Image: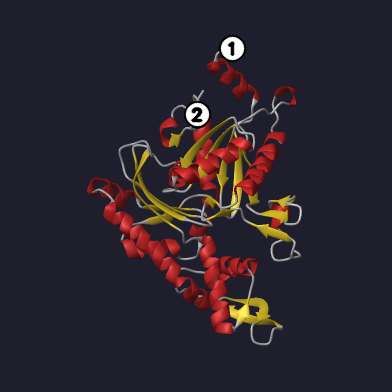
Amino acid sequence: MPRRTLNKIFSFLSVDMAIDLGTANSLVYVKDRGIIINEPSVVAVNNKTGQILAIGEEAKKMVGKTPSYISATRPLVNGVISDFEVTEQMLKYFIEKAAASAKKIFGIANMPRVIIGIPCGVTEVERKAVRDAAKNAGARTVFLIEEPLASAIGAKLAIQDAGGNFIVDIGGGTTEVAVISLGGIVAFRSLRIAGDKLNDDIIQFAQKEYKLLIGERTAELIKINIGSAMPLKEKNEMAMRGRNLVTGLPEEVVIFNDDVQRALDRSVKQIIAAIKVTIEETPPELLADVMTNGIYLAGGGSLLRGLDVLISKETKMPCKIIDDPLTSVVRGAGIALENIETLAEVMSKDEEGEAYT
């Protein structure tokens, strides 16, 4: 039977999906159904036996609470795979869970085509690791799409037109800054400073200022509840619980939003510096479009209070947060999945050169 005919049969029987394989969270979009999975990119492993104990939401509950022989960790660091086998198991779990909830006729969900978002500037080895992990997890064909392109598609920007679109995607592990025109990236910066680094800044600040050791989840809650990119008029506070590094005893300290802003200041300035460098590298004709259209913010990090105002002030250009920034990459990859022929140019095929149909 010709390969093209086989592809059509598999396409009819399979549950094609788009995956945002993020450092902090993984989301899965199933064709014709939308986003059906949104879980943390965390895997709990028994180090004695190598057995996977939990993945996603259940594994996140174990972070910082496991005995020595169990580790609850993220298999992706800064947007790229750091533990291939564990990532493969996590992908397999997400693919099977998505397929099980969207089975087609006769209950068959056979070898889906998968589109996965990846950071800009990753090496070919890192690209291959993502492809291989997805293939080993059960994907028939793997397409990769760069995260800024996916975010721009998710934001409904006209990326295939001859005009400049400036997008900043602040995720968990990386910040992607890109100028897009004619379906491609004209200038970009990929910065390994994002949500996780902001959490770490708060942890370091608590140790330095209060001699208090706090966990990552506590730091993230502080960032979400009272964190800001610039000084705010209102004063907010939050109780911060941890272990006193001097006495070794548990302690509660009240932290204010001004303190958190100071803790995050250096990382925020580095993100803005990356935006300015990308602006400098943008051709003047495209920059004229960007001045009109403005800078679009995507990703969970864009929700940091005052960040859009600060970027607008520093760049002298309008800046807006797109609708539902947390899901922009997977929504964009999902749109590419639904329009795989018209948006084929924005994706890279797998190494076997599978046809899009």
Image quadrant containing the N terminus: top right
Among numbered discs 1 and 2, the one appearing first in the sequence: 1
Mark 1–mark 2 distance (CA, rounded to whole Å): 19 Å
Judge whether residue 250 can be spotted in this image: yes
Nearest the viewer among 263 and 41 is 41
Nearer to us in this view, 65 or 274: 65
Horizontal and vertical percent position of residue 300: 53, 56
Q: Is residue 247 above or below residue 183?
A: below
User: How far across and down, in percent of the image, does residue 96 sit?
Assistant: 69, 37
Mark 2: secondary structure: loop
Horizontal side, residue 110 vs residue 231: left or right: right
- The residue shown at (62%, 52%) is 41
Q: Is 48 on the left or on the right of 315, as rendered? A: right
Q: Which mark is residue 219?
A: none
Image height check: is 319 above or below 330?
Answer: below
Location of mark 2 (residue): 352
Mark 1 belongs to which amino acid? Met
Residue at the bottom extreme?
A: 247
Q: Position of residue 235 (x, y in %)?
A: 53, 77
Q: Amino acid at mark 2?
A: Glu
Return the residue at label 1. Answer: 1
Residue in the picture at 63% in, 43% down: 88
- Name the one closer to the observer, 209 or 350: 350
Residue lying farthest to the front in this orientation: 48
